[in-house]
Amino acid sequence: MKAVTEGRDRVRRVVCPGSFDPVTNGHLDIIGRAARLHDEVVVVVGANLAKQGLFTVDERLAMLREVTSEFPNVSVDKFTGLLVDFCRAHGVSAIVKGLRAVSDFEYEMEMAQMNYRLAEVETLFMTANPLYSFLRSSLVKEIAKYGGDVSSLVPAAVYERLRVRLAATRAGWPQGSGHS
Ligand code: PNS
């Protein structure tokens, strides 16, 4: 039987993957909690999905860097191809994901089991803060597009980028509204 302390001298580097289009307060909550539990957290944007997004991968990376700057052990990167290949190439021992509701579970379990099968990379699930269990980027974009108030759902820097982006498309952002 392996000693429970085996491997403890290694850096515990985990990834928080996602499309982050854009990062929400729910993502940030999971990232911050993961940063308290692990030596290093790499937030990685899946660049495969870039084409369908409201924001480019570079914009998403910039927003993530800005909103995670308070966490000294969090870095931000992007990946193409398989997530497990990124993990292998960067010495990542586990994937950390947030689970909001039962509806997330089936999809997430499938990915977790497949990632383990492909490369024996573990997936650790953190339950979402109940404050954010309804929150996802696509809903934020839809609400913002039709002029709803998303200021409590995303970090201030993201709110500002959404405001500018949606004002540019004249999609209904309330005139003169600012972040409060
Ligand atoms: O924010 P999302 O949409 O939940 O992010 C999904 C993401 C990017 C984490 C996932 O689609 C992914 O890992 N894509 C990379 C391709 C890959 O490794 N696919 C196999 C998963 S078993």
Image (cartoon, rainbow, N blue to C red):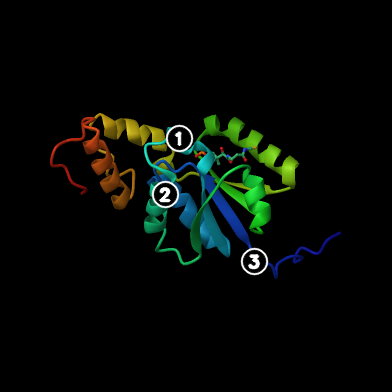
Note whether residue 15 is visible. yes
Q: Nearer the viewer, residue 102 or 139?
A: 139
**Callout 2, which amino acid?**
Asp
Cα distance between the residues tagged 2 and 1 = 12 Å
Quadrant assignment, res 173: top left
Label 2: how many residues lie within 10 Å, few (<14), some (14-19) or many (20+)?
Answer: some
Sequence-first disc among 3 and 1: 3
Residue pointed to by mark 1? 51
* In this view, the mark in front (3 or 1): 1
Cα distance between the residues tagged 2 and 3 = 28 Å
Cα distance between the residues tagged 3 and 1 = 34 Å
- Disc 1 residue: CB within 8 Å of ligand 1: no
* In this view, the mark in front (2 or 3): 2
In which quadrant of this rendering is ligand 1 seen?
top right
**Helix or strand or loop: what does disc 2 sit on?**
helix
**Helix or strand or loop: what does disc 1 sit on?**
helix
Label 3: how many residues lie within 10 Å, few (<14), some (14-19) or many (20+)?
Answer: few
**Callout 1, which amino acid?**
Lys
- Determine contact: label 2, label 1, CB under 8 Å: no
Residue pointed to by mark 3? 11
Residue 14 drawn at (x, y percent):
60, 56
Sequence-first disc among 2 and 3: 3
- Determine contact: label 3, label 1, CB under 8 Å: no
x 18%, y 46%: residue: 178
Counting the numbered discs, the total is: 3
